[in-house]
């Protein structure tokens, strides 16, 4: 990993941008100089003002809680430039006709990956509740934080659905609309990537794997999404089978074989 700071003035700016030395240390541990430049650029653009700490850190990305100039909270999802993974990302991107026009170097791939999640969020928000995509810069995506008082709402995994059959139906209907209206498959849908607000409304997150319906993997991914979600609500008492659920999302599957024509 290269030096995070190349000049004293960068270090000075970072000191001001990070809310606490913990937040800054967390950042210094996982990220590099290019990412610092992206964050400073987002600050210059007036997108974010302060970085308040790590919300969650996964294998591909770290999610920071940030404050916008208007005082509202938001999230910065930072894709890490990890060594091997970006070749798989490149292949996955090239399968999607919307995202083929980019170079093969790591930086371009990461940027395109970020653009993809941004664009998927914008599309999805037309048919279902998901975070508002605010901006992206290289490998940093800024989006609405789904929660209250700086704390995200619980994941579907952590709540006991009151009416599993009805909730499952809602999700299946949303999947169908996303496919029909926006030609999009979420691709990583499960009880881990759905948050639930105080009214019990489900809010989908994590659209980085989302693909256009013509992607070679789209049918397989959609089937897996349906299986995950049906399995989760099944554990809580729904008795809809995966086949029935799939039929609700893509009418005609009962009499055909995968890969389904989406
Ligand atoms: N918009 C959001 N609002 C609230 N919490 C979020 C939001 N986006 C991500 N998170 C939190 O950060 C975690 C990781 O983000 P996610 O987009 O799922 O990335 P990944 O699973 O690929 O690491 C989520 O499981 C959730 O807890
Ligand atoms: Mg996730």
Image (cartoon, helix red, strand yellow):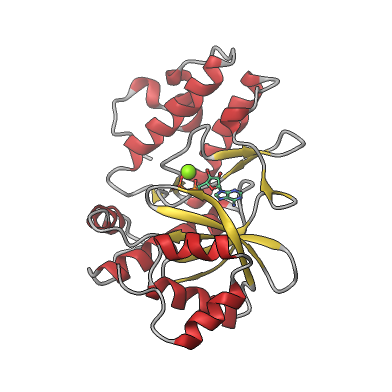
Q: Is residue 200 visible?
A: yes
Q: Is residue 169 visible?
A: no
> In the figure, is residue 75 to the left or right of 149?
left
Where, quadrant-wise, is the C terminus in this rendering?
top left
> In the figure, is residue 56 to the left or right of 20?
left
Q: Quadrant of residue 123?
A: bottom right
**Residue 73 vertical placement versus 229 (above, below):** below
**Residue 243 vertical placement versus 221 (above, below):** above
Q: Quadrant of residue 30?
A: bottom left
Where, quadrant-wise, is the N terminus in this rendering?
bottom left
Say which residue appears at 46% left-offset and 25% top-offset. 247
Q: Quadrant of residue 76?
A: bottom right
Say which residue appears at 24% left-offset and 55% top-offset. 91
Please state which of residues 254 and 31 is positioned toward the viewer in this rendering.
31
Residue 216 horizontal/vertical position (percent): 27, 46
Residue 79 horizontal/vertical position (percent): 41, 59
**Residue 11 vertical placement versus 246 (above, below):** below
Say which residue appears at 59% left-offset and 69% top-offset. 18
Say which residue appears at 54% left-offset and 76% top-offset. 14
Residue 73 horizontal/vertical position (percent): 69, 61
> In the figure, is residue 107 to the left or right of 201?
left
Q: Give the tally of numbered discs.
A: 0
**Residue 36 vertical placement versus 131 (above, below):** below
Residue 85 horizontal/vertical position (percent): 26, 53
């Amino acid at each position: 990993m290269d030096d995070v700071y190349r000049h004293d003035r960068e270090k000075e700016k970072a000191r001001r941008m990070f809310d606490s030395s913990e937040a800054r240390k967390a950042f210094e541990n996982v990220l590099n100089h290019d990412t610092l430049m992206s964050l400073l650029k987002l600050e210059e653009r007036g997108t974010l003002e302060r970085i308040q700490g790590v919300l969650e850190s996964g294998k591909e990305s770290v999610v920071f809680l940030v404050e916008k100039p208007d005082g509202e909270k938001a999230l910065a999802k930072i894709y890490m430039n990890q060594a091997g993974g970006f070749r798989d990302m490149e292949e996955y991107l090239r399968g999607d006709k919307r995202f083929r026009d980019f170079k093969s170097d790591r930086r371009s791939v990461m940027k395109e990956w970020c653009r993809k999640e941004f664009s998927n969020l914008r599309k999805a928000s037309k048919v279902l509740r998901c975070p508002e995509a605010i901006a992206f810069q290289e490998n940093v995506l800024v989006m609405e934080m789904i929660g209250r008082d700086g704390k995200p709402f619980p994941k579907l995994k952590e709540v006991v659905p009151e009416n599993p059959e009805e909730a499952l139906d809602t999700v299946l209907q949303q999947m169908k609309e996303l496919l029909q209206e926006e030609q999009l498959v979420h691709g990583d849908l499960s009880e881990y990537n759905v948050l639930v607000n105080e009214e019990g409304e489900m809010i989908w997150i994590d659209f980085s794997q989302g693909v256009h319906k013509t992607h070679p993997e789209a049918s397989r991914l959609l089937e897996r999404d349906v299986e995950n979600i049906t399995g989760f609500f099944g554990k809580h008492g729904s008795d809809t089978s995966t086949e029935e659920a799939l039929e609700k999302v893509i009418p005609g599957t009962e009499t055909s074989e995968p890969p389904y024509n989406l």
